[in-house]
Amino acid sequence: MHTYQLAKNLADRGIEVSVYYSNPSNKNKIENSSKHNIEGLKLFETKFPKLPPIFGRYIIASFLFSKRLYESIDLNDFDSIYAQGFTAWYFLKKEPFNPKIISNLHGLNMFQNTINCMHLLQQKLYQIPALYIIKRSSKLVSLGGRLTDILNKYKEEKSTIFELPNGIENSWVANATSLDIKKNTPISMSFVGRYEKIKGIEELQYAIMRLPSSIKFSMNFIGPIPRSKRIKHSSVNYLGMINDRDTIKKVLTTSDILVCPSYSEGMPNVILEGMACGCAIIATDVGAVRTMVSDDNGWLISADNISDELLKAFNEAGGLPGELLRRKKLASLEKVKKHFIWDQIIDKTIESLTWE
């Protein structure tokens, strides 16, 4: 999503953009969204290597993919190379501290919380290319919050960090008049995501089961959550996988609170979507989440004991007068309009990274 929005908005500003991608489905998405300015947008497919099921194959394939990109690109043809994820790896092997190369490692999840021994091992593996890229990059992009702290810890003194958040399209933003709180109705909450330990869904469901009967609420789960992993609760609805954006917007605009209890994140688009739809937010203080969530628009909770922290936030939200909850919802809406609309972010991106 970030690549798509970045390419689209740069092309919309009249900048010539060449996108090197590995997933063919991304080509149609970018073309369809940017066809009014397709002259400034060129797309090149580069196959991601397929390796046998060997230990560390994704890391090896990422290095080979970066090499393929490097060999297919003449750096002299471009003013800047914006490298997402591990794609800068081979470039920085050949061109360390090249000011043209801008590295964005997104969520830096390999330096965040671990959930078990296997996850810890995976993180250690991913730290190998991540540290190599951080230590040899002249320009580094951070989504903000705790991610900037991570980059500052490992980067070289001569490197520069640019804080550039993810953004959302203006079409997501709800009308403030739609945020009126209906009296004597349960608080409506939503969770959007897949069933995965790192997303904190088990802790969320456990917290729900511990809520006192005095807290009246409804909870919608959007995502591919197996039936065997669902809890039985009269106030919980499992809506399954929803791909239609308008349907997701409808659920979020009728929700009071979006819950995002992950152990590790970058800058979740779902939080921006929830804020744009006028949701107050309950989320863990990981990644760049603190740049979006604070006391004024929600509850920023610790990732150290997620279930207990969620229970505390739910109890506070359940006892909140309707007008105070509405203020939090309005604060989300105003914050996203002020800081996280793509029209603003792309201008800051161009200014910060000097696309010359």
Image: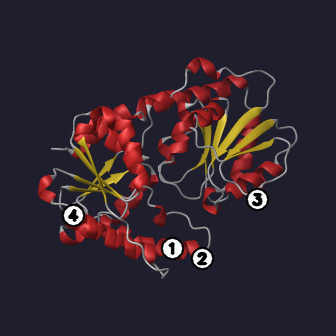
Q: Earlier in the sequence, mark 3 or mark 4?
A: 4
Badge 4 marks a residue whose secondary structure is: helix
The secondary structure type at the circle numbered 1 is helix
* Circle on res. 44: none
> Which residue bears the numbered disc 1?
122
Q: Which residue is mark 3?
A: 229
Residue 331 pos. (x, y %)? 55, 29
**Circle on res. 117:** 2
Going from the N terminus, do you reach mark 2 or mark 4 first? Answer: 4
Residue underneath mark 4 = 72
Label 2: state its secondary structure.
helix
Frontmost of labels 1 and 2 is 1
Image coordinates of residue 4 in percent, x first then y, are: 38, 45
Distance of label 1 from label 2 (alpha carbons): 9 Å
Mark positioned earlier in the residue sequence (1 or 3): 1
Q: Nearer the viewer, mark 1 or mark 3?
A: 3
For the residues marked 1 and 4, what is the alpha-carbon distance in whole angstroms? 30 Å
Callout in the foreground (3, 4)? 4
Residue at point 55%, 39% (across, down)? 294
- Looking at the rendered structure, the kind of residue marked 2 is Cys
Amino acid type, mark 4: Ser
